[in-house]
Image: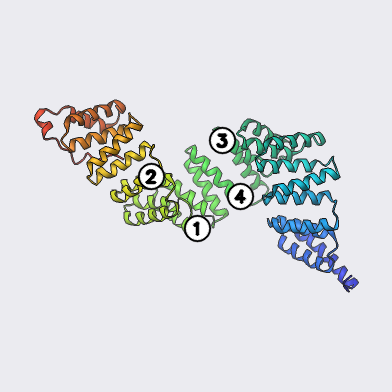
Amino acid sequence: MGGESMNDWAGAEARVERAHELYERGQWVEAAAELRSAIRINPYNASWHFNLALALEAMEDYAKACDSFEKALKLDADDVETLNCLGINLTRLGKYSEALEHFRRVERIDPLNEPCFCNRIVAYTEMGDHEKAELMFYMARQIKEECPACYYSIGNSLFARGQYDRAIYCWRQTLRMEPSHPQANVRLAEAFWAKGELAQARDHYRTEIQRKAYDNRPQDPELLLDLGELLMDTNDLQEAEDSFRQAIEAADDNASAHYCLGELLLRKQDWPAAEASLRKSLELDEKYPGAHLKLAEALIRQKKVQEGAKHLVLELRHRGSDAEVLKEAGQLLLEAHQSRQANIVLRRLVKLQPADAHAQHNLAVSYFMMERLDEGIRYCRKALKLKPDYSLALYNLALAHLQLQQVPRARRYAMRALTAAPQDANIRRLARRVGAMGFWSRLKARVNPSEKPLA
């Protein structure tokens, strides 16, 4: 007994009672402290270890929760609730084989225990073994026909396989059985979004947000960000902005929220406000993916080219092998007339993606801007081999050949460009000028100062 007095044991029981009250109020750290004090006095009570594990689980400390569940099992080896809870937390830690063994152990003790089948759906889904996940779903339904957790979990498996309609059916069944399920509306929104049915996706996001407000629960900033990004896809920019600002109100230290708002403000061409939001994002996370790139755009649009270029360098330092980053950085540098820096970036992009006609063309433009016409012509022709009707490449080749006084070639490329894009005002203007040139004017042809390579 370790020499503890009856008063000590009574004190331990009192601590456990306080822990229950604290747990119910959501004060999990305090509840765990009370339970640990009680366990130090009496380490042989399995339920106290189990309750400590629940408090740790609520704190999302799944590794320590597993330790406490295992201590409870040493005192009560066949308790199926403890075995199931341990399996759930092992699944959260990615220890799927261990989790499955605990669920199978429950089945051996109690073949009619529905949770041990239901919980295996999650483990098998995470492992990518969807056939076994579906088998567990049907076995669970033999014991309990209507289980919202089963339908929710198999919906996740179906979604992972791209079977969106079946997933939607399962999540709707989840909500029919459990209208307050915390994730089903969000998953429905994601499935409709994946199907391209954006209005239905938006409605499910709104339903979940309204449900949280009705229950007086804090809004989830990630949910608000998802809704905001969806609204950007539907071009509902004001409502998207409202959603991002609500996410910031819910969590001002969320770098993603400030980044998303900054990206939206860029689309609205509010460059100073976009700059402020993106700077805030970088204050919170100096390596936030894309933030230096977007901040560079906001600065360059305000003619702060040198500072913008510095942020492009920082973005490329972290993500210099990302083709999309290189593509966007190259385009920005071209627009800012930073042809040498653009050339360096675009050469790296072409090396990564030699079959990208747009990359080959923009590299050509950087050479044209540097007045290295032969190299520009070479990369423009590479772009045309990949995309024969590429109107910008045809236009820029016409300009380059005019610069070289090669009027017949310039005329041919200008006519091809006009055929590819008959409504383009720049191309129509160039085609008219080249087409109207007489013999002597052709010999003296030059590019007008207003006619520059187009990126």
Cα distance between the residues tagged 3 and 1: 29 Å
Let me know if residue 180 appears in the view: no
Q: Position of residue 421 (x, y in %)?
A: 31, 28
Residue 54 quadrant: bottom right
Which residue appears at 83% of the width and 65% of the height? 43
- Camera sees residue 184: yes
Residue behind mark 1:
285
Q: Nearer the viewer, mark 2 or mark 1?
A: 2
Disc 4 and disc 2: Cα gap in Å? Answer: 38 Å
Local packing at callout 3 (Cα closer than 10 Å; few below 14, some 14-19, many 20+) is some
Check residue 349 in the rendering and tell me which mark sits there, or answer none: 2
Which residue is farthest top?
419
Q: Is residue 233 above or below residue 26?
A: above
Q: Are marks 4 and 3 in contact (CB under 8 Å)?
A: no
Query: Which badge, 3 or 1, is on the more N-terminal residue?
Result: 3
* For residue 27, side relative to residue 321 (left or right): right
CB of mark 4 within 8 Å of CB of mark 2?
no
Pointer 4 and pointer 1: residues touching (CB < 8 Å)?
no
Dot 1: element: loop
Give the residue displayed 82% in from the left and 46% down from the top.
106
The label number, if any, that marks residue 220 in the structure image: 4
Which tag, 2 or 3, sits closer to the chain's start? 3
Q: Residues within 10 Å of mark 2 (few under 14, many from 20)?
A: many
Q: CA distance from mark 4 to mark 1?
A: 20 Å
Report, in whole angstroms, how far the alpha carbon at label 4 lies from the one at label 3. 21 Å
Q: Amino acid at mark 3?
A: Ala
Q: Residue at x 29, y 31 (%)?
A: 424
User: Three-letter amino acid code at disc 4?
Assistant: Asp
Mark 2 to mark 3: distance in Å? 30 Å
The secondary element bearing badge 3 is classed as: helix
Residue 114 drawn above or below residue 66? above
Q: Which mark is residue 194?
A: 3
